[in-house]
Amino acid sequence: MPSLIYRGLRIRYELAGPTNAPTFVMVNGLTQYAELWEPYHTAMTAKGFRIAAFDLLGQGESDKPSLFINQEDHVNVLRQLINELGRGPIFLAGISFGGLIALRYAILHGETISGLVPMSTFAELSPQLLLLGNAMRTGLILGGTSYLQDLLLPMNVSDTWLVSRLDKLGTVKRPGWLINDLYALQNLMESFLEFTPLTRQLSSIQLPTMILNGEFDFLTPRALHETLRSNIPNSALVIIQKAYHAFTLEVPTLTANLLINFATDVMAGRWNEQGSIWIAPESVGGELVRFPAGYDHLRAIPTRL
Amino acid sequence: MTRFLGPLDNEGRVPPLQQTRVSSFLISAHSAQARQLCMVLPTHFRNAMDVELHSQFHHAMEIASMLARATSWVQDPILAFLIGKWEATWMPRAADGVTDSGLALLIDLVALGHALHAVIRPAALLPENINPLDPFALALHRTEFDSGRVLQAQVMFLKSNELMSVRDQVSAAVERRHSEVRSLWIAMLHGIGITDL
């Protein structure tokens, strides 16, 4: 397994697909690890793409700084990783915490990538998200990593996904519990103590940007993605039907296809969205449908504008 | 290569030699913490940190006492040698670059506590098919679970504004203690056949 060294710390990453092919770099959310992107390998490499996944500093098998880590460190690691990826176009996708890191990267180093896909993410902490984040940190401290997983699972995936796994949740949780250390997760969460909103800097992102948001994501709901859509000039918001916060885990093939189609459009010069809003198909092979004109995409019931 | 304790016996229990070695390490480390905390705790508390450290002192004693009673002990010929090495590592060493010697020793004490509670994850050594009601397995779970809470005293102190002016020295002291504890823990586990770490 290849690795990078950043300020004496080792970052583990993995690559699949041909060298110098267009590459997707995937940035994890909290508690995630590189192997969670393996379902994307087949779909992406079959279409001639390469995929790079890595463990964030403080997570998985990457080194875990003992006390202090800030979000800039993750951006610097990403810069180093992208520098090592060769000449093919680079597309950067990140989910949740990883989406925030991807946004920060695009603001600072947008010239090094060809497209951006923020997923289930945010540029500012709404009061709800702030308080949910605080509750998760307290849950981690008082109940350990296992309790944090217990909190996150029902928030992040659908009943459909859970129902077939209810009798083996221990096994589902175990890899994440084994590979993540409480103190390191706490350090990552505490990197938000000095968080300042990115909203005013979003307009500097001139890249083609596809924003993905689960229809039922209540951890980072539509309004937070609307901030991205309305401030990033060449962006489109794509709503993933019946999906929750962690749709990348729940519908990997569908998500991989959306990513491939996005990159294909960008490379063909067809991406020019200007804040359009789309509904993703329910299954692979379907078409994106434009969100009905005249209706409010921020509401859960059809409300005319 | 394995990363878990075992092979388990017919009742899903960890082999006694592994129990003896793991518990000896944990008892040595947490007893050292308790002894050091006992030395620094004032008779009358002066600040919030003293309350946290007092709680930690009792947790350290509880962990040592619980493991002593939950372990299936066997003779271990090299234990005396190992304990000597472990105890030498737990000895206080003032944090480098901090001019106030009392503060430098306190930073080291708290850094050692942070390392013990953060780096050592005894429950993560248990295989999935462990007997969940076995006292040793439960004691390891309890030790790891409590570590997450106890750790907060160290986090509060080490990240406090009070230490902002010596943050680099604090970081260095904590990294050093993490490295020492990790290295001893891994070496001990190698000695009982756990090599995939």
Image: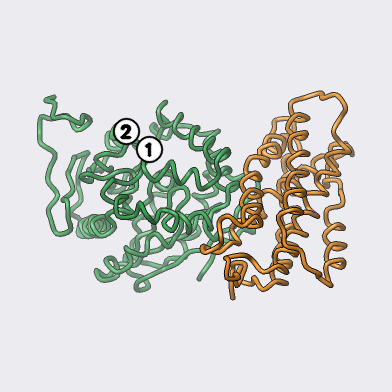
Chain colours: A green, B orange
Give SS at disc 1: loop
Are discs 2 and 1 less than 8 Å apart at CB?
A: yes
Residue located 39% across and 46% down the image: A153
Residue B83 is drawn in which quadrant?
bottom right
Q: Which mark is residue A227?
A: 2
Q: Quadrant of the C terminus of chain A?
A: top left
Residue A122 image label = 1
Q: Residue A304, position in %: x, y?
A: 11, 25
Chain under callout 1: A
Coordinates of residue A247 in the picture (x, y in percent): 30, 49
Give the residue furthest to the front.
B11
Q: Real-space Cα distance between discs 2 and 1?
A: 8 Å
Residue in the picture at 32% in, 50% down: A162
Q: Secondary structure at mark 2?
A: helix
Q: Nearer the viewer, residue B45 or A282?
A: B45
* Residue B68 drawn at (x, y percent): 76, 54
Task: Tell me which residue sits at (39%, 56%) in the image.
Answer: A168
State left or right for residue B21 relative to residue A163.
Answer: right
* Whether residue A94 can be seen here: yes
For the question of whether residue A105 can be seen, the reply is: no
**Which residue occupies 19% across, 33% down?**
A297
Residue B123 in which image quadrant: bottom right
